[in-house]
Image (cartoon, rainbow, N blue to C red):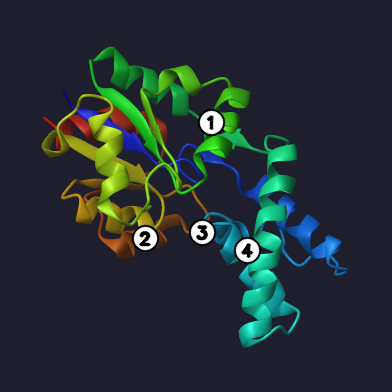
């Protein structure tokens, strides 16, 4: 069976608004004002909680060990803030589920491999009403390793009963590109995220400008 594995944040859904809101809640809890901008810092949000905290505390002038200590102190609270308000601003990208259903209709298995903790990914997908469409879900803590290691991606394929030689990854960052390369899979990177056409520098097998074009791209890469 052919399989298509999706990243979640920045690929299936724009989660940046809720992620940045959670990070800013951490900065306020530490006695600082909001440090991140929902529009200008959206790209950092898709690189995870620690990346957001690092950016914010760096802007506050934290250096070296003080910076690392602040990140570790605030990481768990960030996840708590995020879980409490996980879908206020998050939206699926236009055409996402139509494309997913088109793939499923042709017998292609679909799953998710994300560096979001599995529990949070499960909660978000349930809240968005789309969890049932995906036959596998691998999060950052499902296995001892996460992307760009190949193991999570291969596990997402395995849980669908698929063959890695007949699978590809749809993502949006260098982490996805490196994970696909490690797993020896084709990679499609979306261009509708904050990095736009900049992802072309990562030399994926294909670029996706909108979800309407995905079924044809999959047929081309997994004939």
Q: Which of marks 3 and 2 is nearer the N terminus?
A: 3
Q: In which quarter of the image is residue 177?
A: bottom left
Label 2 CA crowd tier, 10 Å (few <14, some 14–19, many 20+): some
**Marks 4/3: CA–CA distance:** 8 Å
| Residue drawn 47% across the image and 40% down it | 8
Q: Residue pushed farthest front?
A: 144
Question: Secondary structure under badge 3?
Answer: loop
Q: Earlier in the sequence, mark 2 or mark 4?
A: 4
User: Which residue is under mark 4?
Assistant: 52
Report the side of 150 relative to 209 (left or right): left
- Give the camera-side residue of 30 and 202: 30
In this rendering, the answer to whether 108 lies above or below 195 is above
What quarter of the picture does the C terminus occupy? top left
User: Which residue is under mark 1?
Assistant: 122
**Marks 1/3: CA–CA distance:** 19 Å
**Marks 3/2: CA–CA distance:** 10 Å
What quarter of the picture does the N terminus occupy? top left
User: Which residue is under mark 2?
Assistant: 174
Q: Position of residue 97 (x, y in %)?
A: 45, 23
Q: Where is residue 145 in the image (x, y as percent from the top left)?
A: 36, 53
Report the side of 18 relative to 199 (left or right): right
Q: Earlier in the sequence, mark 1 or mark 3?
A: 3
**Marks 2/4: CA–CA distance:** 17 Å
Q: Quadrant of residue 53?
A: bottom right
Label 4 CA crowd tier, 10 Å (few <14, some 14–19, many 20+): many
User: Which residue is under mark 3?
Assistant: 47
**Marks 1/4: CA–CA distance:** 22 Å
């Amino acid at each position: 069976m052919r399989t298509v594995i999706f990243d979640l944040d920045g690929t299936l859904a724009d989660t940046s608004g809720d992620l940045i809101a959670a990070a800013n809640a951490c900065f306020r809890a530490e006695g600082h004002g909001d440090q991140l901008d929902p529009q200008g810092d959206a790209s950092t949000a898709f690189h995870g909680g620690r990346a957001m905290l690092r950016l914010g505390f760096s802007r506050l002038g934290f250096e070296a060990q003080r910076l690392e200590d602040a990140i570790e102190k605030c990481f768990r609270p960030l996840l708590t803030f995020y879980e409490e308000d996980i879908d206020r601003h998050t939206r699926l990208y236009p055409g996402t589920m139509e494309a997913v259903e088109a793939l499923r209709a042709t017998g292609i298995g679909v799953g998710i491999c994300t560096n979001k903790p599995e529990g949070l990914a499960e909660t978000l997908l349930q809240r968005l009403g789309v969890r049932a469409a995906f036959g596998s879900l691998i999060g950052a803590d499902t296995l001892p390793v996460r992307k760009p290691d190949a193991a999570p991606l291969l596990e997402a394929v395995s849980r669908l009963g698929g063959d890695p030689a007949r699978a590809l990854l749809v993502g949006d960052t260098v982490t996805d590109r490196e994970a696909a390369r490690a797993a020896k899979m084709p990679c499609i990177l979306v261009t509708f995220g904050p990095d736009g056409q900049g992802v072309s520098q990562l030399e994926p097998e294909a670029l996706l400008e909108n979800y309407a074009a995905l079924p044809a791209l999959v047929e081309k890469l997994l004939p």
